[in-house]
Image: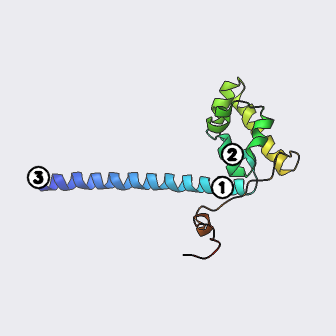
């Protein structure tokens, strides 16, 4: 009888583990699909994927827009805020609503994309896995 009880407990724990694995896998797949949709939206120029946790350098890199566009449009003068603070922190610091700040960032992105803002050339994307990114420039002259 003792062996039978151990078998039942082991079976129940195995079923519980399988159920938890199923729910975790489903959640992971949904998160990945959401990530792909957001990434595709960014690639298509959709500015609605701006989130409160993003920083201005991250947004600048993500949307390939020069950082001075944001500092000028948002009238930011504090270097630390521009470089390190999230949009939520910037909104709190400037005593404005987060949704208004996000809307201002989105309009800056759209204005730059539609060439209504002239604040510098777009940022060039440099692939991090490119071999030329890690190689040294060619040497001139003879090697000794």
Q: State left or right for residue 5 relative to residue 31.
A: left
Q: Using the image, determine if residue 131 lies above or below residue 70.
A: below
> How crowded is the residue under tag 3: few (<14 C-alpha within 10 Å), some, or many (20+)?
few
> How crowded is the residue under tag 2: few (<14 C-alpha within 10 Å), some, or many (20+)?
many
Which residue is denoted by mark 2 in the rendering? 59
Place of residue 3 in the rendered image (x, y in percent of width and height, measured from the top left): 13, 56
Residue, far left? 1
Q: Using the image, determine if residue 98 lies above or below residue 69.
A: above
Secondary structure category for the residue under label 2 = helix
> How crowded is the residue under tag 1: few (<14 C-alpha within 10 Å), some, or many (20+)?
some
Contact between marks 2 and 3 (CB within 8 A): the answer is no
Secondary structure category for the residue under label 3 = helix
Q: Closer to the camera, 37 or 43?
A: 43
Secondary structure category for the residue under label 1 = helix
State the colouring used for the structure image: rainbow
Q: Does label 1 or label 2 sit earlier along the sequence?
A: 1
Q: Picture quarter containing residue 83?
A: top right
Contact between marks 1 and 2 (CB within 8 A): the answer is no
Which residue is denoted by mark 1 in the rendering? 39
Residue under the image location 59 percent in, 56 percent down: 33
Question: What numbered label is drawn on residue 2?
Answer: 3
* CA–CA distance in space, label 1 to label 2: 13 Å
* Mark 2 or mark 3, whichever is nearer to me: 2
Q: Is residue 1 at all visible to an observer of this figure?
A: no
């Amino acid at each position: 009888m003792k062996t039978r009880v151990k078998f039942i407990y082991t079976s129940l724990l195995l079923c519980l583990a399988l159920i938890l694995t199923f729910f975790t896998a489903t959640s992971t797949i949904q998160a990945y699909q959401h990530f792909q949709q957001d990434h595709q939206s960014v690639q298509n120029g959709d500015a609605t994927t701006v989130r409160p946790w993003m920083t201005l350098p991250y947004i600048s890199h993500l949307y390939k827009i020069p950082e001075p566009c944001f500092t000028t449009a948002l009238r930011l003068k504090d270097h630390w805020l521009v470089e390190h603070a999230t949009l939520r922190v910037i909104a709190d610091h400037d005593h404005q609503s987060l949704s208004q700040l996000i809307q201002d960032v989105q309009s800056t992105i759209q204005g730059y994309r539609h060439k209504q803002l002239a604040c510098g050339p777009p940022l060039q994307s440099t692939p991090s896995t490119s071999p030329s990114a890690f190689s040294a420039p060619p040497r001139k002259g003879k090697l000794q």
